[in-house]
Image (spheres, rainbow, N blue to C red):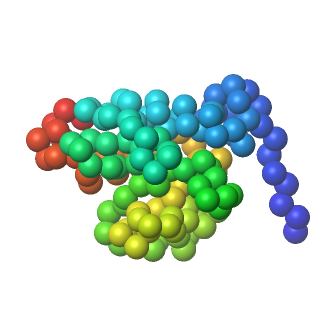
């Protein structure tokens, strides 16, 4: 059975005005979701926009990092969840280089809604943020 790829539309709820293949459009999504979380700071790290809380990384944008074909965000997930996500939703999640061995996942931004992405980013923030900030969210 041949898979038919859905065409992008500016009315697609999880996307902005640029097609999903656009790294800039996906970066805006990630920035918007991360900026809503307390004490988030964005800085370049390893040439990519990276999001910090309390001086620690909780999300890294990856725009075809080392020509790997992924427009994604790399985030930590709770212990045990990485294997489940990689097995049950391989079209959406992958093992990112460098941080994958520490329980992080790569999230394919073209394959995930804003609602689901926001939930994963919030959980990543909670895993990394100092406990005293948890009450702010």
- Answer yes or no: is residue 103 visible: yes
Relative image position of residue 19 (x, y in whole percent) = 73, 35
Q: How many marks?
A: 0
Residue drawn at point x = 54 percent, y = 74 percent: 87
The residue shown at (24%, 44%) is 55
Q: Camera-side residue: 1 or 94?
A: 94
Q: Quick one: quadrant of the C terminus?
A: top left
User: Residue 43 or 93: which is nearer the viewer?
Assistant: 43
Q: Position of residue 113 (x, y in %)?
A: 57, 43
Specify the quadrant of the image occupied by residue 67. bottom right
Q: Residue at x 46, y 30 (%)?
A: 32
Whether residue 37 sits left or right of residue 25 in the image: it is: left
On screen, 110 above or below 97? above
Pick out the residue farthest to the left. Answer: 132
Residue 114 picture location, percent across and down: 53, 39
Viewport quadrant of the N terminus: bottom right
Q: Residue furthest front?
A: 47
Q: Is residue 64 left or right of residue 81?
A: right
> Which residue is at a point 85% across and 54% down the rendered structure image?
4
Q: Which percent across, then down, holds residue 100?
A: 44, 68
Whether 47 is drawn above or below 15: the answer is below
On screen, residue 46 above or below 10: below
Splitting the image into 4 quarters, where does residue 69 fall? bottom right
> Residue 108, can we see it?
no
């Amino acid at each position: 059975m041949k898979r038919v790829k859905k065409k992008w539309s500016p009315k697609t709820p999880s996307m902005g005005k640029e097609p999903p293949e656009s790294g800039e459009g996906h970066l805006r999504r990630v920035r918007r979701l991360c900026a809503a979380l307390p004490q988030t700071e964005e800085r370049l790290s390893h040439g990519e926009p990276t999001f910090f809380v309390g001086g620690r990384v909780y999300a890294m944008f990856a725009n075809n990092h080392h020509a790997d074909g992924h427009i994604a965000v790399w985030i930590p997930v709770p212990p045990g969840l990485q294997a489940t996500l990689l097995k049950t939703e391989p079209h959406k999640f992958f093992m990112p280089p460098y941080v994958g061995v520490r329980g992080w996942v790569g999230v394919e931004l073209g394959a995930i809604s804003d609602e689901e992405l926001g939930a994963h980013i919030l959980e990543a923030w909670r895993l990394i943020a100092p406990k005293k900030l948890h009450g702010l969210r």
